[in-house]
Image (spheres, rainbow, N blue to C red):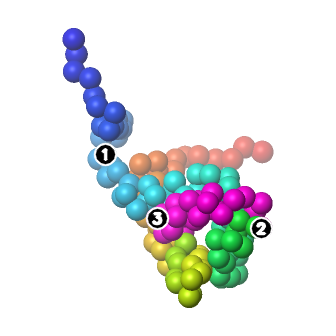
């Protein structure tokens, strides 16, 4: 019987050009996970313009429970999309612009390495 990979191991990527591509960092994976949910994307829209919001405000504006809002905000914070600060008994969240920019730069570099644009690609029409 052939050896079976454990669920935590990923197959090695195969590339026809023979290039070795470094996998994305854990931070980038968390960033992408934060963006992977439509609900979390809607939450991010609430923070446009650098506004700070509490869990209760986010929950109210999206029509979800505070527990759900808190869990989703935690995913966004782990992904570096939001930062938080304590204000008395309240926790206020806002977009972490610098962290988002770093993650986008890393994502762009990763995509250029693993999926470079075709040099001969042209748009018909």
Q: Position of residue 11 (x, y in %)?
A: 32, 34
Look at mark 1 in the image and give the residue it sits on.
Answer: 19
Judged by its main secondary structure, the magenta piece is: helix
- The answer to which image quadrant residue 106 occupies is bottom left
In the image, what residue occupies the spot 54% across and 69% down?
81
Q: Position of residue 16 (x, y in %)?
A: 36, 35
Q: Quadrant of the C terminus?
A: top right
Look at mark 3 in the image and give the residue it sits on.
Answer: 78
Residues shaded magenta: 61-81
CB contact under 8 Å: marks 3 and 1: no
In the image, what residue occupies the spot 75% across and 62% down?
62
- Residue at the farthest top position: 1
Q: Quadrant of the N terminus?
A: top left
Return the residue nearer the eye: 25 or 60: 60
In the visual, does 84 lie left or right of 55? left
Nearer the observer, disc 3 or disc 1? 3
In the image, what residue occupies the spot 72% across and 58% down?
64
Q: Position of residue 7 (x, y in %)?
A: 34, 33
- The answer to which image quadrant residue 70 occupies is bottom right
Q: Is residue 86 magenta?
A: no
């Amino acid at each position: 019987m052939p050896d079976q990979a454990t669920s935590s191991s990923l197959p090695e990527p195969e590339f026809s050009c023979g290039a070795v591509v470094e996998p994305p960092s854990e931070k980038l994976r968390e960033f992408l996970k934060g963006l992977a949910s439509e609900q979390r994307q809607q939450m991010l829209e609430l923070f446009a313009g650098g506004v700070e919001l509490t869990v209760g405000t986010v929950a109210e504006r999206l029509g979800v429970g505070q527990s759900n809002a808190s869990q989703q905000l935690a995913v966004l914070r782990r992904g570096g999309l939001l930062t938080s600060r304590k204000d008395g008994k309240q926790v206020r969240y806002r977009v972490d612009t610098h962290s988002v920019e770093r993650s986008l730069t890393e994502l762009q570099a990763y995509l250029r390495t693993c999926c470079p644009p075709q040099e001969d690609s042209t748009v018909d029409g």
